[in-house]
């Protein structure tokens, strides 16, 4: 991490927040269009510090959108509560009649996408007096803290990500199941490297999260579950964390490629109102040769390469396979 000295940054002032990541940005007025030098420095600081806090920015949703669009195209979240007029704008407006849903779990945003967002911008409009903090965890610091043995073990692995938490939003009846199926076709599970390389800094990042990651590709279920549990637990290590206490008009920009977050739901039923936009990103890539499924499977009865379970020449037929056959 850079020093944040005036040599590195001349147009913005940075105050380091966490031991491993995070900085408060001062000297910018987000009601105004930023100069190209300010933009360059904020972009550099985002990759370097992973998580930037802008305080006392009394700005509108439009100002927030204009700011975020500097970094790329904004995405529309298929499942989060959003503005009807501006679908890119996610509105977290919770009170006694609307409890918060689904953000009190460690995650990087929208990793169920083939190309998850590169960054997220979240702005506090009305925050509770007590509670409602957001925790951030640096997954590059978490990677650096692993033993060389563990780094080499997880290098080249891939994991499957799915929009599983949002499946609860569909009705549990025939129509709901039909709708869910339509969305499952639109958002099929995707595969990302377990260790991604940050496209700007080149740092390695542990890129699995308990919200969306469902399995390590090519591993038996129990192997996958125990490895994922260990990797998910990395975000909980206090040394890698920063806990943000929100004030009205605080805005945060985090690098979704290197940071996970967790919204603490302890404030409910008090009111908490924040607005969020996410900036499209690229397909994550690792820096290692991907391990083949066969090399990972092993076990008591290894299968010849290319043979899927239940799909061999003499495999017994199963009803779902017949159903698929019938529909062809
Ligand atoms: C989110 O997960 O994007 C929401 C974070 C928060 O409400 O603090």
Image (cartoon, rainbow, N blue to C red):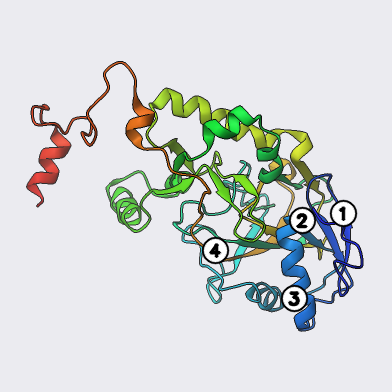
Residue that lies at the very extreme toward the top in this rendered image: 300
Looking at the picture, does residue 156 appear above or below residue 250?
above
Q: CA distance from mark 3 to mark 4?
A: 18 Å
Number of numbered discs present?
4
Secondary structure of the residue carrying numbered label 3: helix
- Residue under circle 4? 281
Label 1 CA crowd tier, 10 Å (few <14, some 14–19, many 20+): some
Point out the tag, 1 or 4, that comes first from the N-terminus.
1
Instruction: State which tag comes first along the sequence, 1 or 2.
Output: 1
Residue 252, visible in the rendered structure:
no
Whether pointer 3 and pointer 2 mark residues with C-beta atoms closer than 8 Å, the reply is no
Label 3, label 1: how far apart the Cα atoms are: 19 Å
> Residue tagged by mark 3?
39
Q: Which mark is residue 16?
A: 1
Q: Position of residue 213 (x, y in %)?
A: 49, 41
Rendered residue at 87%/54% (across/down)? 16
Q: Is residue 324 above or below residue 88?
A: above
**Residue beneath the point at 69% across and 58% down:** 254
Q: Mark 2 — residue?
A: 49
Q: Residue at (52%, 42%) from the top-left corner?
A: 194
Label pair 1/2, CB-CB below 8 angstroms: yes
Q: CA distance from mark 1 to mark 4?
A: 25 Å
101 or 225, nearer to the observer:
225
- Upstream in the sequence, badge 2 or badge 4? 2
Q: Earlier in the sequence, mark 3 or mark 1?
A: 1
Mark 2 within 8 Å of ligand 1, using the beta carbon:
no
In the drawing, does residue 199 fall left or right of residue 242?
A: left
Circle 4 Cα neighbour tier, 10 Å, few/some/many (<14 / 14–19 / ≥20): many
Q: Earlier in the sequence, mark 3 or mark 2?
A: 3
The residue nearer to you, when weighing 116 against 246, is: 116
Mark 3–mark 1 CB contact (< 8 Å): no
Report helix, strand or loop for mark 4: loop
């Amino acid at each position: 991490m850079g020093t944040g000295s005036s040599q590195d940054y001349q147009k913005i002032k940075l105050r380091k927040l966490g031991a491993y990541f995070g900085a408060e940005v001062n000297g910018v007025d987000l009601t105004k269009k930023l100069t190209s030098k300010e933009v360059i420095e904020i972009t550099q600081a985002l990759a370097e510090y992973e998580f930037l806090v802008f305080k006392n920015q009394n700005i509108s949703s439009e100002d927030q959108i204009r700011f975020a669009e500097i970094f790329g195209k904004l995405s529309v979240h298929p499942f989060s509560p959003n503005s009807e007029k501006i679908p890119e704008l996610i509105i977290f407006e919770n009170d006694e009649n609307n409890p918060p849903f689904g953000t009190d779990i460690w995650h990087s945003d929208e990793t169920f996408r083939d190309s998850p967002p590169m960054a997220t911008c979240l702005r506090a409009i009305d925050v509770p007096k007590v509670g409602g903090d957001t925790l951030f965890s640096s997954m590059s610091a978490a990677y650096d803290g692993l033993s060389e043995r563990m780094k080499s073990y997880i290098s080249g692995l891939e994991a499957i990500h799915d929009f599983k938490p949002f499946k609860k939003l569909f009705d549990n009846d025939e129509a709901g199941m039909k709708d869910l199926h339509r969305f499952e076709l639109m958002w099929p599970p995707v595969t990302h490297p377990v260790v991604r390389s940050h496209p700007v800094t080149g740092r390695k990042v542990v890129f699995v999260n308990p919200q969306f990651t469902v399995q390590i590709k090519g591993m038996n279920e129990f192997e996958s579950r125990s490895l994922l549990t260990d990797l998910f637990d990395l975000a909980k290590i206090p040394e890698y964390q920063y806990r943000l206490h929100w004030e009205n008009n605080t805005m945060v920009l985090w690098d979704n490629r290197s940071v996970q977050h967790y919204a603490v739901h302890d404030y409910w039923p008090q009111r908490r109102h924040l607005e969020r936009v996410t900036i499209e990103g690229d397909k994550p890539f690792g820096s290692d040769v991907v391990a083949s499924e066969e090399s990972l499977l092993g076990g008591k009865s290894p299968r010849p390469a290319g043979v899927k379970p239940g799909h061999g020449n003499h495999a017994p037929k199963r009803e779902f396979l017949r159903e698929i056959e019938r529909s062809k």
